[in-house]
Amino acid sequence: DTGVSQNPRHKITKRGQNVTFRCDPISEHNRLYWYRQTLGQGPEFLTYFQNEAQLEKSRLLSDRFSAERPKGSFSTLEIQRTEQGDSAMYLCASSEDREVRDYTFGSGTRLTVV
Amino acid sequence: TQLLEQSPQFLSIQEGENLTVYCNSSSVFSSLQWYRQEPGEGPVLLVTVVTGGEVKKLKRLTFQFGDARKDSSLHITAAQPGDTGLYLCAGLYGNKLVFGAGTILRVKS
């Protein structure tokens, strides 16, 4: 296993377009998380899945954002009608379901909305 | 409001100097982690501390978890240019990790 994989690495889109990002977690990890990071800040939690169930969503996740993990393996994060304020690094992480969890992050998808 | 406050925000030092980065909160965490992040990459886990008062060493890095499990520190001895990066502390809050804003460390040769 090569770790958490995210695609694409970079995405430039025009305001108003929809974008979709993909995350492939470590195969034996049943928890998957999405975070957003803007310049000069730490990552902010967006949502997490345990297997295919989306168990928690942040208030940051407006109705333009939707995340899925249909078979409990890879996950997608879609942003509809993108706005300039959506420009950020979108990070995916996965972990085992244990009390003390080691999180493995992907390299992220850098979104630029022009 | 940031749940975890990190200080300093930015640190620029000469190679060979020692430094300490602090992570403070008014909340108790069941565990706390430190990450290092390079530009354009995701954070990489350095250490997890679980027990109040715990001290962990990773080569030239020493991590300490406060007795009350509300704060932590990262001390680097004899910093090297390869230590340059963004250092993030993160606490487990319910089912999610909550991050501080990070400390940008620059080590000049």
Image (cartoon, coloured by chain):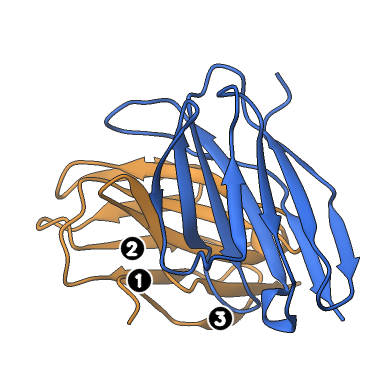
- Kindly identify which chain the residue marked by label 1 belongs to: B
- Kindly identify which chain the residue marked by label 3 belongs to: B
Q: Residue A72 location in percent, x, y?
A: 55, 24
- Kindly identify which chain the residue marked by label 2 belongs to: B
Badge 3 or badge 2: first in the primary sequence: 3
The verdict on a common chain for dots 3 and 2 is yes
Q: Which amino acid, by three-letter code, is at mark 1?
A: Tyr
Q: Total number of numbered labels?
A: 3
Give the Cα distance between marks 1 and 3: 12 Å
Depth check: give the residue in front, B72 or A102: A102
Q: Residue B57 location in percent, x, y?
A: 39, 43
The residue located at (28%, 54%) in the rendering is: B64
Circles 1, 2 touching at the beta carbon (< 8 Å): yes
Supply the letter of whichever chain is orange: B
Pointer 1: what residue? Answer: B22
Q: Name the mark on residue B11.
A: 3
Badge 1 or badge 2: first in the primary sequence: 1
The residue located at (46%, 37%) in the rendering is: A49
Pointer 2: what residue? Answer: B73
Q: Which amino acid, by three-letter code, is at mark 3?
A: Leu
Give the Cα distance between marks 1 and 2: 5 Å
The residue located at (71%, 64%) in the rendering is: A80
Q: Residues within 10 Å of mark 3 (few under 14, many from 20)?
A: some
Q: Is residue B51 left or right of residue B79?
A: left
Give the Cα distance between marks 3 and 2: 15 Å
Q: Is residue B19 visible?
A: yes
Quadrant in the picture for the N terminus of chain A: top right
Q: Residue B92 location in percent, x, y?
A: 31, 50
> Does A21 appear above or below A39?
above
Q: Is residue A84 left or right of residue B26?
A: right
